[in-house]
Image (cartoon, rainbow, N blue to C red):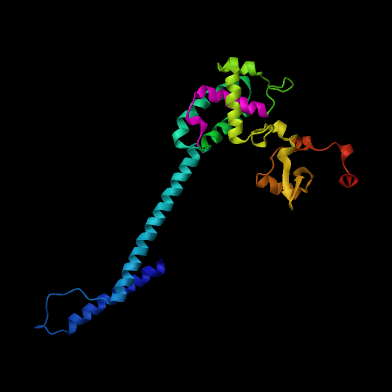
Amino acid sequence: MPRLTEELARLNQNIEALVIELRRHRPASDRREPQPARVPEDQRQLVRVSRRRHLGARKMLASVTLRGTLSGCMGRDNPLRIPAPLRHDVEEIFKLTDPFCAEHLDAEYGDLVRKLVAKLARKRPSPLARGDLRIWAAAAIYAVGSVNFLFDRTQRPHLTGEDLSAMTGVPKSTIAYKAKLVRDALRIGQMEPEFCRRKLLASNPMAWMISVGGLIVDARTMPPEVQAEARRRGFIPDLPASMDNAGEAPAGDRSVDDEE
């Protein structure tokens, strides 16, 4: 672009010099009203092309700058990437799920429920576009709870389906039905790593499976540098060492080579 601008400036200077020279050598009696200098057709074509390119480049730069600015603003204001048409409904659902998780479950459950609702909103078409938002809120909690054994009395925190129904005011059968729709829409299975609590991730074999040379292996059995790269790419959870080792095989099951 700078080189093209320099060529245009040089061309304009040559034209002006030519006009001045013609005026100087023309007889006074012959002088008429100054006429615009005729530029050869090929040079006029070059000027037109150059101007079009210059304007096109300016428009493209402005468009890219505006797009980047809008994208940055939207990324900061909408980290869960919730589509604009559903943003109000999703916020209403969050107003129900956030206090419920804070009072009856914990903050990690609240974050997972938010993540699930946002992913459901991005689904095309999204089931959230119709239906009672109160039911969708209860179904989201139920779906995340079923992934994390919320209804198992040995787990903490723990709720029953009846508890959830009584606390949300939604019939248990309706919650279970809507939760199944959510799981089917997002293809969520038991102990789904994406919606699994960190405490369960360490003992969840699905969260640690990676492909190395076409073979499916447990990342925890691989060298540290392979594990680090898998974590960097988001293939395996980034857990503290104490939780990471919780899912490893007992010492008696290790090979002699491991002990060396």
Residue farthest right in this picture: 256
Q: For residue 11, which quarter of the picture?
A: bottom left
The overriding secondary structure of the stretch rendered in magenta is: helix
Q: Is residue 120 magenta?
A: no
**In the rendered structure, does residue 138 fall within the stretch colored magenta?**
yes
Rendered residue at 70%/26% (across/down): 149
Outermost residue, left side: 29
Asked whether, in this view, residue 31 is left or right of residue 223, the answer is left
| Vertical arrangement, residue 164 with respect to residue 53, above or below | above
Nearest the viewer among 256 and 179 is 179
Q: Is residue 1 above or below residue 11?
A: above
The magenta region covers 125-147
Q: Nearer the viewer, residue 226 or 42?
A: 42
Residue drawn at the location 61% of the way across and 23% of the way down: 176
Q: Is residue 162 above or below residue 256?
A: above
Considering only vertical position in the picture, is 129 above or below 160? below
Q: Position of residue 172 (x, y in %)?
A: 60, 18
Residue 22, position in %: x, y?
20, 81
Q: Quadrant of the N terminus?
A: bottom left
Please state the horizontal and vertical placement of residue 132, each as a whole percent of the image: 49, 23
Coordinates of residue 114 in the picture (x, y in percent): 56, 31
Between 85 and 3, which is closer to the camera in this rendering? 85
